Image: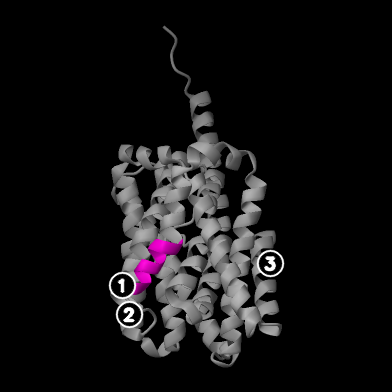
């Protein structure tokens, strides 16, 4: 049952949402919180740039087919599914929640959990590292472009002006962090716990600021409980379709079991760490509504991937045991 219990970070997020709901920042406090969120997110992307190894990006040249499928799943399949479902049944959710679902579909993949689940399942960890790195680097450019292209008509974003904000507040710190990697990369590697604490703290500050602003605007009066249940069903359907599609595509392409695992876990994830700051920059006062579907999807993907990773690992162990038994029963003849 432990795999169905939210991890500590999700519990911290829920606690932050509760705090923002009960004690939202208002007036001058809201201004200070907004500045604190901006500084924290700038630091977050600076550290992202300092930590992501350039070697992993360059290594992607060795497996172009695998990485191309992961990119297509993350930035093409997911958005097409979300847009198609919205076009087919717009009445299932209020417009604001649909906007949040579409935003989730346009985000990059995760890094840490993709690699962790690929490792647990016995998959191609170097490929997962490379794919997750490429996805996060591409997401800084691709996600704002997709949002501008497909969501500006609903008034969720201001178009190219919002892309400029992303460039200034997220991309520039990311590039500066990458350039400083020779100077601070080793320090970041030695202090993973401290860097991880800064990461999580930055996200919690951003969530508090976004949800506090949304609470002041009456976010909890906007959606009925049954609408949130429908949201969970829709996100679960999206996750299932993408995972099954990646499994089928991997086998049609003749990928190894290890590559299939990397494809399934990297191609089906959406990054909370990138999504929260991206929402804060792209959507401003609407960021709280955008983050709500993302938090639901994040916890759902962790639970589903935990179960799937253990099944992959168990199947791999069974195949190795069967191969060992077969080899013992039919030893190679000696010359």
Counting from the top left corner in percent of width and height, residue 210 is at: 56, 76
Report the Cα–Cα distance between label 1 and label 2. Answer: 10 Å
Marks 2,3: beta carbons within 8 A: no
Image side of residue 322 versus residue 250, left or right: right
Seen from the viewer's position, the closer of residues 61 and 206 is 206
Residue at label 2?
A: 152
Q: Earlier in the sequence, mark 1 or mark 2?
A: 2
Residue at 45% across, 60% down: 170
Q: Residues within 10 Å of mark 3 (few under 14, many from 20)?
A: some
270 lies above or below 290: above
Residue 7 visible, this orientation? no
Tell me the number on the disc at residue 177. none
Position of the C terminus, as image quadrant, is top left
Numbered badge on residue 160? 1
Secondary structure of the magenta portion, mostly?
helix
The answer to whether the residues at label 1 and label 2 have Cβ atoms under 8 Å apart is no
Q: Nearer the viewer, mark 3 or mark 1?
A: 1
Q: Which residue is mark 3?
A: 12
Q: Residue at x 52, y 60 (%)?
A: 42
Residue name at image x 54 percent, y 53 percent: 113
Closer to the camera: disc 2 or disc 3?
2
Dot 2 crowding, Cα within 10 Å, few <14, some 14–19, many 20+: some
Q: Is residue 166 magenta?
A: yes
Q: Kindly give the residue lying farthest to the top in the view shown.
A: 335
Q: Which residues are magenta?
A: 160-169
Does dot 1 land on a helix, a strand or a loop?
helix
First in sequence: mark 2 vs mark 3: 3
Q: Is residue 252 left or right of residue 209?
A: left
């Amino acid at each position: 049952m432990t795999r169905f219990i939210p991890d500590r970070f999700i519990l911290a997020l829920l606690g932050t949402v509760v705090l923002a709901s009960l004690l939202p920042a208002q007036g001058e406090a809201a201004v200070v919180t907004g500045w604190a969120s901006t500084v924290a997110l700038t630091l977050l992307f600076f550290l992202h740039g300092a930590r992501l190894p350039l070697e992993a990006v360059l290594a992607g040249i060795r497996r172009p087919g695998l990485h191309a499928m992961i990119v297509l799943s993350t930035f093409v399949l997911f958005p097409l599914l979300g847009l198609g479902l919205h076009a087919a049944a717009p009445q299932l959710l209020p417009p604001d929640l649909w906007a949040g679902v579409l935003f989730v579909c346009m985000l990059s993949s995760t890094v840490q959990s993709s690699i962790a689940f690929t490792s647990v399942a016995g998959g191609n960890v170097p490929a997962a590292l490379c794919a997750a790195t490429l996805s996060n680097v591409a997401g800084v450019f691709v996600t704002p472009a997709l949002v501008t292209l497909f969501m500006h008509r609903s008034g969720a974003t201001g178009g190219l002006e919002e892309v400029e904000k992303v460039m200034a507040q997220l991309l520039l710190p990311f590039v500066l962090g990458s350039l400083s990697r020779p100077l601070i990369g080793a320090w970041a590697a030695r202090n993973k716990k401290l860097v991880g604490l800064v990461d999580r703290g930055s996200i919690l500050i951003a969530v508090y600021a976004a949800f506090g602003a949304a609470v002041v605007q009456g976010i909890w009066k906007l959606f009925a409980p049954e609408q949130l249940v429908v949201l969970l069903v829709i996100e679960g359907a999206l996750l299932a379709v993408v995972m099954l599609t990646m499994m089928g595509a991997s086998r049609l392409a003749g990928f190894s079991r290890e590559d299939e695992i990397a494809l399934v876990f990297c191609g089906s994830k959406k990054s909370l760490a990138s999504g929260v700051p991206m929402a804060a920059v792209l959507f401003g006062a609407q960021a709280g509504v955008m983050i709500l579907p993302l938090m639901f999807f994040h916890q759902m993907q962790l639970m589903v991937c935990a179960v799937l990773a253990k099944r992959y690992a168990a199947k791999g162990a069974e195949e190795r045991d069967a191969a060992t038994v077969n080899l013992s029963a039919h030893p190679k003849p000696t010359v």
